[in-house]
Amino acid sequence: MDLAERTRRRVTLRLMPYLVLIYLTAYLDRANIGIAKLQMQGALHFTDEIIGFGAGVFFLGYFLLEIPGTLIVERWSARRWLARIMVTWGLMATLSGFAGLLPLPLSARAQFYWLRFLLGAAEAGFFPGVVVYLSHWFRPEDRSRAKAWFMIAQPLSIVVGLPLSRWILETVHWHGLAGWRWVFILEGIPPVLLGFVTLYYLTDRPEQARWLPDDEKAWLVAELAREERQRVVAGRVGGFDALRDPQTALLAASFFFIVTGNQAILFFLPSITDNMKSMSIVWRTVVNVLPYVCSVGGILLNGYLAHRTGRNRLHTAAPMILSGISLGCAILAGSHLALVIAFFCLVGFTFQAYLPVFWSIPSGFLGKSAAATAVGLINSFGNLGGFVGPYLFGYLRTSTGSYQAGLWCLTGCMFLAGILAASIRTNSSPRQ
């Protein structure tokens, strides 16, 4: 095995399992409201519009600290910043279980909104911080594969967390608290504990890695330094370069529309499947999980193909457009349950497959500080779609009494995201 492959494997085995684990807990604490709402709505008399707004207001808090977070990871310490984020978001997630019970002069609805907002503010910077952190450890040609492994934490958190959340919801009623409260409380504790582990387990830079042999460390440091010299020559290394590059705005717009569609599906798919009353609760849970099982395969396959072809624009735009086609077919399938389930599985296979390729694009045309700024900016503005999607979908559901209008709206968002992504200018294959 040559030096490059040996180094890549060692870094991957050291970092990726742990990063997947901590992102899994982050995404679960963000998404478990989709299950908790099944009891929460009746207990607190919340409509779908209220739940949708609460699910989305998370992203308004998330919006605030994205760019500062990525720059802190780039210029200070990834492990310290990520550890801080994990402890504070875990505490906010746990407090969400006490919405309506906190001794505050606020209604249950206001407490719910503020807790979701603070959860978003606490988690802000985590995802783009890890994206920047991976650029400290992997060469450009290796980043799509590395990010593919990291991104599978999103669907895995649903595959693992949804049955767990459903089990807590139905069976845990300790100390007189309803199951939906324990969903938030029990799933908020692990990130607090993992935050302290992060301080000791992660290493900020390759030159500090005592677990890397000297020859591998020297090779990796030299490769990353060579990449940075190329960016300096190109003159795109400062934060302002990211702000003035039109590709950054195009990436942010594309990400906004795909997140609008994806986040609404994430939060309301449990409600859609819960209406399939002809099936037992167990089978409804299975149907809810299946699209995310497919999503794991889609992310890994698309990341692998992008690594082989280097055609990042194709492997970003195509999954978005295919998601819109699959969701449209699911709507048209109407009452044909088997077809609806099959098309939702196709949606699952494609709707997150763009992730590892999409997040490799900024570091392909910008230097480190500029790329960190771009990642923060794209994730910050793009994730406002996480507010718009659930709120708009909840509003349409409450107004029309049907899921169909909201689903067609999401279909349009996915198509528009794909069209914008197809316009992105990317570099040629790293091999070339």
Image (spheres, rainbow, N blue to C red):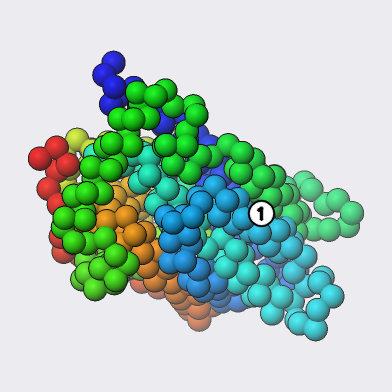
> Which residue is painted at 59% across and 47% down in the image?
25
How many marks overall? 1
Q: What residue did someone put label 1 on?
A: 87
| Residue 138 appears in the picture as rendered | yes
Determine the residue located farthest toward the left in the rendered image: 432
Residue 260 makes an appearance in the image: no
What percent of the width, then of the height, locates residue 33?
61, 60
Query: If the image is split into quadrants, where does the N terminus sit?
Result: top left
Residue 88 in the image, given as x and y percentages of width and height: 66, 59
Of residue 364 and residue 347, the one placed in the foreground of this image is 364
The answer to whether 139 appears left or right of 172 in the picture is: left
The structure residue drawn at horizontal position 47% and vertical position 66%, both measured from the top left corner, is: 68
Residue lying furthest top in this view?
A: 1
Q: Nearer the viewer, residue 207 or 174?
A: 207
Residue, x 54% and y 47% (percent of image)? 79
Report whether 27 appears left or right of 178. left
Residue in view at x 81 percent, y 72 percent: 102
Describe residue 216's horizontal placement relative to residue 85 as left or right.
left
Task: Give residue 51's quadrant in the image.
Answer: bottom right
Residue 323 in which image quadrant? bottom left
Q: Looking at the picture, how far across and down is residue 324, in whole percent?
A: 29, 59
Q: Is residue 212 above or below residue 345?
A: above
The kind of residue on which mark 1 rests is: Val
Measured along the vertical axis of the image, is residue 59 above or below residue 287? below
Q: Residues within 10 Å of mark 1 (few under 14, many from 20)?
A: many
Q: Secondary structure at mark 1?
A: helix
Spot the residue most to the bottom: 105
Q: Tell which of 174 and 278 is nearer to you.
A: 174
Image quarter of residue 176: bottom right
The quadrant the C terminus occupies is: top left
